[in-house]
Amino acid sequence: MSFYYEKIRMFFLENEPTVEHLNKLWSRCLKLYQVIDMFMKIFKMIEVKQKIDAKLEANPDDENMLEKNQTMRKRLQIGIKLLLKENPVLPTAFKFNGVCLLEKLKREEKQFLNKQMNDLGLKAEETVLSDSVMSPSNNMTT
């Protein structure tokens, strides 16, 4: 980060800043802020989901918590997908605690749907996604 700051400082020492230069700099700062903000929102949602999961372990039949868990899972999936889509320089996976979080959320959703199907007396699919779907070379670790 200090490299970029120094580069900008040197540029403005040699050149008179114009409105166009300042506008470009401001635009880049705003983009950086938005990426940091998206990461922070994802991490806050992860914390909330972990708390919901803990409450569900204590009381697995709580319909309110099941609904909150499903909503939080969907919000996390959407947030991660948007982050990765809007920032193509980021890896194609989002690793958290050594597991691809996106794949884990998909697996949880499939298990939830299978449980719902079983509760209704319908036959559920037996397919479960693996944790090792993504190759380690293009995963993002946190």
Image: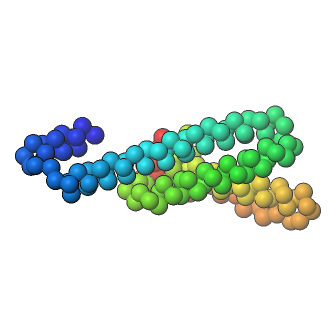
Image position of 60 (left or right of 86): right
Q: In the figure, residue 24 lies in which quadrant? A: bottom left
The colour mode here is rainbow
Looking at the rendered structure, the number of numbered marks drawn on it comes to 0
Expressed as whole percent of the image width and height from the top left, the position of residue 12 reads: 13, 45
Rendered view: 96 above or below 20: above
Question: What residue do we see at 63% from left, 52% from top?
Answer: 75
Question: Eyeballing the image, is 10 above or below 71?
Answer: above
Judge left or right: residue 60 versus residue 96: right
Where residue 128 sits: x, y (%)?
Answer: 70, 58
Instruction: List the single residue furthest toward the left.
Output: 14
Q: Residue at horizontal 56%, vertical 50%? A: 100
Residue appearing at x 46%, y 51% in the figure? 139
Q: Looking at this view, is 6 or 105 the one in front?
A: 6
Question: Is residue 30 in sight in this rendering?
Answer: yes
Q: In which quarter of the image is the N terminus?
A: top left
Foreground residue among 123 and 76: 76
Percent coordinates x, y for residue 10 in the rendering: 12, 42
Front-lying residue, 87 or 17:
17
Q: Which residue is drawn at 24% across and 37% down?
A: 2
Residue sitting nearer the eye, 37 or 119: 37
- In the displayed structure, 127 sits above or below 18; it is below
Answer whether residue 92 is visible to the viewer in this image: no
